[in-house]
Amino acid sequence: MVRRHVRVLVLLLLAAFGAWLVLVQRSQKQQRQREYGEGLTDQDYAGLRAATTLDGFRDNLALIDPHGALHPYLRLHDDGAELQEAPGGEALAAVSWSLASPVNGAPRVEQLRDLRVLIDPGHFGGQWSEIEKRHIVVGERPPVREGNLTWATARLMEEELRASGAKPVVSRPPPPQSPFPEPPPRFSDDQELLAWLRAHLARQPLTSWLSDNPVQLRLLHDAYREPPEEETPAVRAFFTLFNRFDLRRRSQLAEEIGADITLSIHYNVARDPEVNKVLAFVPGGVLAEEMESGPERYWAFKRAIGDELPTLIELAGAISSAMQEELGVSGKSNEPIRRPPRKTPVDEDNGVFARNLAVLKRTPGLVLLLEGPCMNNPEEHQRLLDDSVQIDGEGHPERARQYARAAVRGLKEKAALIWDYRARHRPESQPTE
């Protein structure tokens, strides 16, 4: 009888061990998937395709990864490249170099007709301008809200583009009239908090623990949440999570509508209020510490295997030149360089730089981020308080119209480049007469 009990106990222990082993393996597989972060899955890595050659990749990488922090995770050869999970480790993605040559037979189109342009007015403005820190006051004057300026500029750009036959789409609604928070139903602060922890505590036990314990996550979440009647550190943290969500939504919208180019519209703030300048940013300039994150390495690798950077640099130069001429503001400033620098010069005298900003790294295809004149410059601040331009019954500054006109002019000057890029990636899509 004792032996029988022992055998049963051993069998139970073996069964329990087997079940535990299955759970551990499943957990490890799930954890590997979770480590990617930012919603990235195995399918995202498997779906990567190169649109450039080895030489093109190296040129792109010099701008995207100026500190060489991605190099340990790469294996390059004559036929393609691999992105590794860890230096010398398993390949997360493998691509072959593109053999496609530039489109020669496609007609050279120098018009905007039928191009789909996503206009992304940066920030939110309205009643959210203070919590997002884009609420600029100079002296005793009323505030200038960046989100209001970008919205007006986007609407005026939309008008100009439609007149040129393009198909513009604006990425967000007007500035909010109610205090934050009023997030949309799809937003989950729990999920965003967990995504933030994954990005900042990659491969740490706390992340795994939180991933598998939603009750504990809720307790942690409730510990920093406070009633949102007034701005507190907790409410600002909640806004940060919402902003992460919304930046992803804007980038995804470009893919959903099949945008030929995305323009993210912003206005500048200078460290020296006497400075006034405009800038145009292309993707790139990833900082060394940013490359410690798996998702950052994914986005950097994806951009480096693409063929859009040469086109974007030309577009950025044309738009920046047009903005300087229309607005009477330089693209170059004498401000001391921030250490470490947050942007990589491309054409410094013309105000063109590379920077690793959320919209630039995530938005597929052609994307630029534009910075209009400096809101904290006293003279510019006064101009931005003008309300002579009417949009939907509300007054906005003439500077917004000048900014919009300049951006569209730059697009028109380089429309052929956008059509060439479209022909390479969507050869079935032809311009209409």
Image: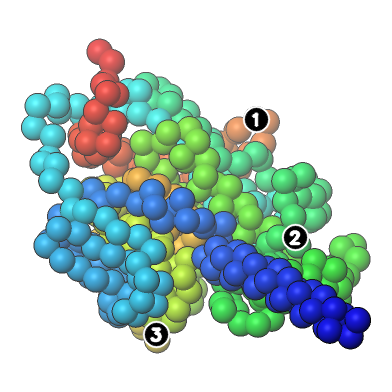
Q: Is residue 177 above or below residue 166?
A: below
Query: Which element type, helix, strand or loop, lies under badge 2?
Result: helix
> How far apart, in angstroms, are the residues tagged by discs 1 and 3?
43 Å
Q: Indicate the position of residue 291 as horizontal and vertical percent values.
A: 41, 75
Give the mark nearest the N terminus, 2 or 1: 2
Provide the residue designation for mark 3: 340
Give the mark nearest the N terminus, 1 or 3: 3
Q: Is residue 115 visible?
A: yes
Q: Is residue 306 left or right of residue 224?
A: left
* Quadrant placement of the C terminus: top left
Query: Which element type, helix, strand or loop, lies under badge 3?
Result: loop
Q: Which residue is painted at 62% across and 48% down in the image?
A: 148
Q: Is residue 143 visible?
A: no
Callout 1, which amino acid?
Asp
Query: Quarter-wise, where is residue 297 in the image?
Result: bottom left
Q: Is residue 255 above or below residue 44?
A: above
Query: Which element type, helix, strand or loop, lies under badge 1?
Result: loop
> What is the crowding at mark 1: few (fewer than 14 residues within 10 Å), some, or many (at least 20)?
few
> How far apart, in angstroms, are the residues tagged by discs 3 and 2?
32 Å
Q: Nearer the viewer, residue 406 or 110?
A: 110
Provide the residue designation for mark 2: 189
Q: Indicate the position of residue 177 as horizontal and vertical percent values.
A: 77, 45
Give the mark nearest the N terminus, 3 or 2: 2
Q: Is residue 50 above or below residue 112?
A: below
Callout 3, which amino acid?
Pro
Q: Are marks 3 and 2 in contact (CB under 8 Å)?
A: no
Q: Which residue is painted at 52% across and 45% down in the image?
A: 252
Provide the residue designation for mark 1: 392
